[in-house]
Image (tube, helix red, strand yellow):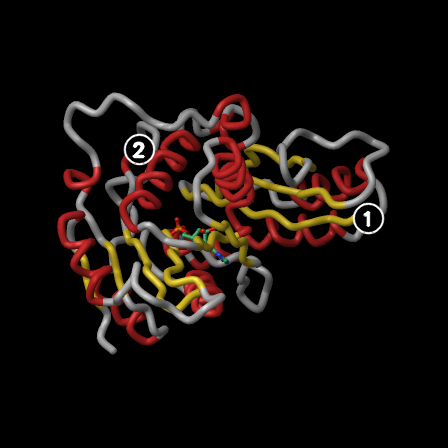
Amino acid sequence: MDVIVVGDRAELAKARQALRIGGAVSPGRAALALVPTMGALHEGHRSLIRLAREQAEHVAVSIFVNPLQFGPGEDYTRYPRTFDTDLEVCAAEGVSMVFAPSADDMYLPDRQVGVSAGGMGTIVEGVFRPGHLDGVLTVVLKLFNLVQPDVAVFGQKDAQQLAMIRRMVADLDVPVSVVGAPTVREADGLALSSRNRYLSSHERRTALALSQALFAGAAEPTPEEVRRTARAVLAGEPAVEVDYLVLVDPATFEEVGADHRGEAILAVAARVGSTRLIDNVTVTL
Ligand code: AMP
């Protein structure tokens, strides 16, 4: 079946009708899973779509570069926009609907109200990107309200975003099941990202220090050694300018103490040239 392309919110109801969403579905199976993206789709997005297809009868992919989650001086205007190839990817992966609204369709010119990420939105990533997580949660809640999925799939690659979306769903009683998907990497360890295309081949080699630091840290037995080893690997690549390297609780993103046992997330954000990259791994202590 062809992908239904929905260019604005007014067409959404028609698309849902065409897919018979809201009507009878197979018992025990969700009708619609949503994969929110900003486009420039890569193998990581494909893996989310495949996971979504296991979860529901139909998959909707949203493609929207959300101005609210970019700060002043960030890459909103130069963010890669590759709609035609994205559509081909969605068709090849069996997506039923692509929702690609314009910023004007999404946001009223006099809008006032948004979602606050609370204190958790001001730590780790929130220190370096003030307001970013508020912008993410606001657009995700709007997408949920507009597309009305039963399930939504997000990547562990953006671990704090995923944790905050789970928090929002719990705190605001949002009727959507959130599913997390593992990070897809290149063979050499670099986490796939739409922003990797900004990297020169030299910068791409430099950027490998991020995943190498995380893997080295994750092999250590205690929080102190995890942090020390990961930091040492990053220090060996001075062209990597580190914003943060943290070992945090997966649900709260608070730094874990020296006697922490169980799972924690080792997360890094760093700039390589003018490109800012983030990555993380789960560590078992
Ligand atoms: P983005 O288009 O970068 O906003 O990402 C859309 C979704 O894809 C988010 O849920 C991301 O966490 C997820 N994603 C991005 N990169 C990867 C990756 N390498 N592996 C798995 N999921 C990813």
In three-dimensional space, the C-alpha distance between marks 2 and 1, rounded to whole angstroms, equals 38 Å
* Disc ID at residue 68: 2
Q: Percent x, y for residue 43?
A: 44, 66
Q: In which quarter of the image is the C terminus?
A: top right
CB atoms at circles 2 and 1 under 8 Å apart? no
Comes first in the chain, label 2 or label 1: 2
Label 1 amino acid? Glu
Q: Dot 1, how many residues are within 10 Å of its Cα: few (below 14), some (14-19), or many (20+)?
A: some
Tell me which residue sits at (56%, 30%) in the image. Answer: 124
| Side (left or right) of 142 relative to 202 | left
Q: Viewer-nearest of labels 2 and 1?
A: 2
Task: Decide: is 205 above or below 172.
Answer: below
Task: Decide: is 42 above or below 7.
Answer: below
Tell me which residue sits at (62%, 45%) in the image. Answer: 237
Q: Dot 2, how many residues are within 10 Å of its Cα: few (below 14), some (14-19), or many (20+)?
A: some
Q: In which quarter of the image is the N terminus?
A: bottom left
Tell me which residue sits at (85%, 46%) in the image. Answer: 221
* Disc ID at residue 220: 1
Please state which of residues 225 and 27 is positioned toward the viewer in this rendering: 27
